[in-house]
């Protein structure tokens, strides 16, 4: 079994402990906790997944409906390549990719990053799955995931490297879905607290289970 997101997160936090000023770190942690109630408008298990076509890191189109003709699709929304928690999750998903494929599943990750930035993220983390660009957050909006970063914490995002001007200060709530070949969502993990992400074991369970499930979050 690949390492869990929780395990990889602990290793990341140990590695980077002390690198950020304490006051900035505390504000970031408080902000993350304050977002936990976001996601009330997000799609849940049992809903039909909206179709979409987006450009991947190689400049090629990815069409959800076409991909679903050959098997289920794991769709993971992340905030951008600048987000360290997103990068931990992307790394975790890459580790589990061989097991996803044994279930005939395809994995895609979606962010507002432009294709060039998505390519940089894919190359930096040696990602072997499609990293899709949703620069106007159209798909994130269709899945009910869009939120506006509060003005009083935008400096934290800029320090992390986020270009909020490109997205009008709007970002997707981190979320991961397993979409079945019938276009219905089998599994949904949505949590505004960007430190909390879907676990590999739950995704694999959803791939082998026809009963729709919403993860706690």
Image (spheres, helix red, strand yellow):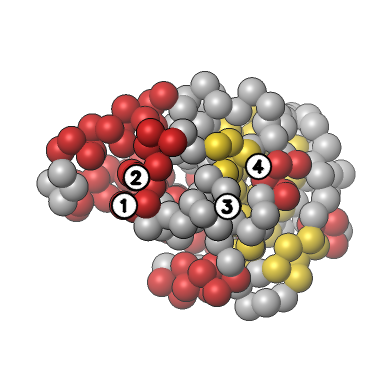
Q: Are marks 2 and 1 in contact (CB under 8 Å)?
A: yes
Q: Are marks 2 and 4 in contact (CB under 8 Å)?
A: no
Whether residue 160 sits left or right of residue 51 in the image: it is: left
Closest to the camera, between mark 3 and mark 4, is: 3
Tag 4's secondary structure? strand
State how far apart marks 2 and 4 are (Cα): 30 Å
Whole-percent x and y of residue 119? 53, 73
Whole-percent x and y of residue 207? 67, 44
- Name which quarter of the figure residue 31 lies in: top left
State how far apart marks 4 and 1 are (Cα): 29 Å
Residue under the point 86% across and 44% down: 182
Residue 159 is marked as: 1
Tag 2's secondary structure? helix
Whole-percent x and y of residue 27? 27, 32
N-terminal label among 3 and 2: 2
Residue under the point 80% across and 55% down: 52
Residue 77 is marked as: none
Residue under the point 70% across and 42% down: 141
**Residue density around tag 4, few if under 14, some if 14–19, many if 20 or more, within 10 Å:** many
Residue 155 is marked as: 2
Residue under the point 57% across and 44% down: 170
| Residue 3 in sight here | no
Whether residue 70 sits left or right of residue 11 in the image: it is: right
Tag 3's secondary structure? loop
Q: Which residue position is annotated with label 4? A: 177
């Amino acid at each position: 079994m690949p390492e869990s997101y929780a395990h990889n997160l602990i290793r990341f936090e140990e590695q980077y402990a002390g690198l950020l000023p304490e006051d900035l770190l505390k504000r970031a942690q408080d902000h993350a906790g304050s977002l936990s109630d976001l996601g009330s408008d997000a799609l849940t298990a049992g809903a039909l997944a909206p179709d979409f076509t987006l450009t991947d890191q190689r400049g090629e189109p990815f069409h959800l409906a076409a991909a679903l003709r050959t098997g289920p699709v794991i769709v993971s929304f992340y905030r951008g390549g600048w987000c360290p928690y997103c990068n931990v999750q992307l790394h975790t998903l890459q580790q589990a990719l061989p097991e996803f494929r044994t279930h005939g599943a395809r994995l895609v990750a979606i962010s507002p990053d432009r294709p060039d930035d998505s390519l940089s993220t894919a190359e930096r983390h040696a990602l072997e799955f499609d990293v899709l660009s949703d620069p106007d957050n159209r798909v994130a909006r269709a899945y009910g995931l869009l939120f506006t970063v509060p003005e009083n914490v935008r400096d934290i995002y800029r320090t992390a490297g986020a270009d909020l001007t490109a997205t009008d200060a709007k970002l997707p709530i981190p979320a991961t879905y397993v979409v079945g070949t019938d276009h219905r969502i089998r599994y949904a993990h949505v949590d505004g607290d960007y430190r909390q992400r879907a676990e590999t074991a739950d995704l694999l369970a959803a791939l082998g289970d026809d009963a729709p499930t919403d993860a706690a979050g």
